[in-house]
Image: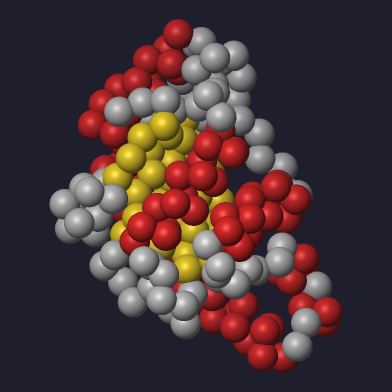
Amino acid sequence: MAITKILNIMESEGRNPASHLKNALEYIKNPDKTEECVLVGGINCLPDTAFEQMEETKNIFHKTGKRQGYHVIISFSPEEKVTAEQAMYVLEHFAKDVLGDDYEAVHAVHTDREHMHGHLIWNSVSMTTGKKYNSPKSNWKNHLQPITNKYCDELGLSIMPAEYSRNPKNISRDKWEREMSMKEIILRDAKMCAYAAGNVV
């Protein structure tokens, strides 16, 4: 079972507006967390030059301000023995489903905690259309969590139906308690990422 969380990476004040994006990318690529970067990959960009490529895309389309990118965290339950390879599979396929050929992104699996978790950061500006990615409030329930569930299901892992988060009365007490513990795990992950990035809103 894995739960998905999406964070906005906003512009930095008083310096390069993309500084928080750069910090977030550096955080997820940390060699100490990614088996010396073995568990790092890129979509539509190279991980080592991703920030420069993202900045170039923003400059080409004259969209250098406001929202700089998105940061998704996919946290797997400690109750399931998820391998780094399985986590990478879910993360890579999730990224391709959500972003296609339109956005530069870096993904990484972190193995430094008691639970396996992955990170995906992508540019807010499409490299093909110049449009900014839009994530409405319903995006998690209707789009993001179901994609995570699809790839967990393919691997034989349990899934977290998106409607559980909105209506816990529909599930058993045991499942509700398990979801609450998963929410605490991902909240800790999100707080750590916000701290590392400087100011993720």
x then y, percent, for residue 153: 61, 62
x then y, percent, for residue 152: 56, 61
Give residue 25's quadrant in the image.
top left
x then y, percent, for residue 98: 59, 38
Q: Is residue 58 visible?
A: yes
> Does residue 125 sit above or below 27 in this rendering?
above
* Residue furthest right as drawn: 170
Colour scheme employed for the rendering of this structure: secondary structure
Q: Nearer the viewer, residue 62 or 106?
A: 106
Q: Residue at x 54, y 81 (%)?
A: 181
x then y, percent, for residue 159: 63, 68
Give residue 120's quadrant in the image.
top left
Q: Is residue 139 left or right of residue 31?
A: right
Q: Is residue 190 left or right of residue 27?
A: right
Q: Is residue 148 left or right of residue 137?
A: left
Looking at the rendering, in which quadrant would you find the N terminus? Answer: bottom right
Q: Nearer the viewer, residue 46 or 180?
A: 46
Please count the marks in the image.
Answer: 0
Q: Nearer the viewer, residue 18 or 185?
A: 185
> Does residue 12 sit above or below 154 in this rendering?
above
Q: Nearer the viewer, residue 108 or 150?
A: 150
Q: Residue at x 61, y 19 (%)?
A: 131
Q: Is residue 189 left or right of residue 19?
A: right
Q: Is residue 67 visible?
A: no
Q: Residue at x 36, y 66 (%)?
A: 83
Q: Residue at x 41, y 32 (%)?
A: 43
Give residue 46's quadrant in the image.
top left
